[in-house]
Image (cartoon, rainbow, N blue to C red):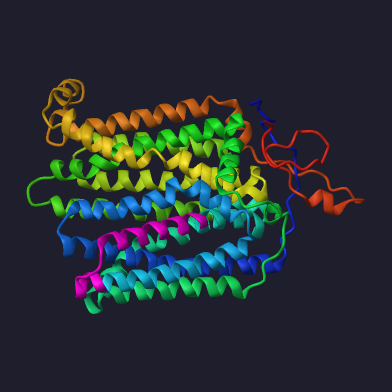
Amino acid sequence: MPDTADTPAARPRPARPPSSSRAFGVLWGGQLVSLLGSSAAAFCLALTVYTETGDASALALIVGASTLGSIYLAPVAGAVSDHFTRRQVVCVGNVTLSLLSLLLAWQVWRFTDEGDAEYWTILLLVFLAGVVKAALSTTLAATVRQLRAERDLSRVNGFTSLIETIPTVSGPVIGAALHTVVTPAAVFAFEAVTFAAAGAMAAAVRWPSVGRESGRNRRLRPFAGALRGFRFILGHSGFRRLQAAYAGVNLFAGLATAVVTVYVVSSSTAGTEERNLAAFTVAGPVGLLLGAIAMLTLGDRGSRFAAVVTAIAAGALLGRLGLALTAVPLLWFLAQLLNQACVQISNAHATAVWQERTPTDIQATVFGARRLLGQGLFPPAVVLGGFLADRGFQDHGRLAEAAGTLVPRLAEDGGGAGLLLACCALGQAALALLLACSARVRRLTARPRPAPQSPASPTAASEPCHASDPAVPSRRPTTGPAS
């Protein structure tokens, strides 16, 4: 498959009607409401399942069912989403999630009070909700360019990241509070209300018609559409390199996720394990909040390429490696804070690149394929990390003792898990170095320079071009890389 031009033709900043700003604010205000309800319900579901069954594997199946739908079926969900208008997907998606939450409330009530609900029905509902959420989230990412000016994209992604992160901090608190005063089923009924409210808010505003929405003129073929998203990414060398780097970052993140709790607990002094683990756990979402605030404040200042590479490298060396080489709990907190803030910063800039360079009519399709390619290795990496921690990276094992001759910290308690964390950090830093050496990714992440608008053809001048457009004056529309 031949490569397309690495740099799209210059394009002007598209006009943004006032109605689009209002629609964007109302849309994401509704999503904040629904995410608060969803986060509270997720916390309550995990607590309820474990309380009723006492089985960690049952809890793992809940997480697995959600992951299977939200990551591994994201390409198909995105392809289906692109067949309809963004407004239709957002409204119908929220209404569908509201209905699934009501069914889940009924099943949880039967599971806890009646004892006659089948556990597999809860798993099925969680799986279906994950698929719908995948379609909804890829569509929401695609609406950014429809509703906001392109020059604002990094800052706007900081705003949307802030909206998505706030519930990770406050949602569990709301869920815990509701769990103490109402039945678990009532919490899922509350979640259904928040989804319905989000759908109603999205339906209440007028969405501007920006760009072309040609998906409705095509026959609905989910799997063929999903392949189209993969072809778009794999057919462009810059996207291939950028996506491979993020897949590697998520691989090392999964390996580290499996052992970080072991590291904090085994490295703590007696009697401080719970306090240190709680502080470390809180540092994650707080870091994401700080990263979102930084993006909201700084936006597009400076080089996107430098920001992405620096954030990946800093998260690896100062965040993960810094965690592995110290036994001071305060430094653990700061390292995790920095690591998650860097994740937020790199993701906001990278997402802005995808939003700029991807044709508007296939953005949900491409974003679904991007999710699978980027995050697909994370769940198996978590399992592999746990296996490695048990088999080769034990405290005072041969690997830890050998590494301890060079770094004494790794020969102490927690050194085995710390060595695995250090290996993950060095692997991620190597990916940042490879990314920094990629001229094609550098050109891909460069902001398009505004092109002069032709007085004779204002409409044509305002039509955005795409990553696959040849860098020539021709305005021939394209939908993906040449095959």
For image coordinates 27% across by 39% down, the residue present is 383
Residue 468 visible within the image: yes
The percent position of residue 244, horizontal first and vertical second, equals 48, 32
Q: Quadrant of residue 381?
A: top left
The percent position of residue 69, horizontal first and vertical second, equals 41, 52
Residue 299 visible within the image: no
For image coordinates 32% across by 50% down, the residue present is 64
Which is more toward the observer, 331 or 357? 357
Q: Is residue 122 within the magenta segment? A: yes
Would you place residue 317 above or below residue 335 in this image? above
Q: Residue furthest bottom?
A: 181
**What residue span does the magenta drawing correspond to?**
110-135
The percent position of residue 399, horizontal first and vertical second, equals 17, 23
Q: Quadrant of residue 54?
A: bottom left
Q: Residue furthest left?
A: 270
Q: Is residue 35 within the magenta segment? A: no
The percent position of residue 339, horizontal first and vertical second, equals 36, 43
Q: Residue furthest right?
A: 456
Image side of residue 145 versus residue 178, left or right: right
Would you place residue 313 above or below residue 221 in this image? above
The majority secondary structure of the magenta stretch comes to helix
Image side of residue 94 versus residue 281, left or right: right
Quarter of the image containing the N terminus?
A: top right
For image coordinates 38% across by 47% down, the residue present is 340
Would you place residue 83 above or below residue 110 in this image? above
For image coordinates 38% across by 56% down, the residue present is 127
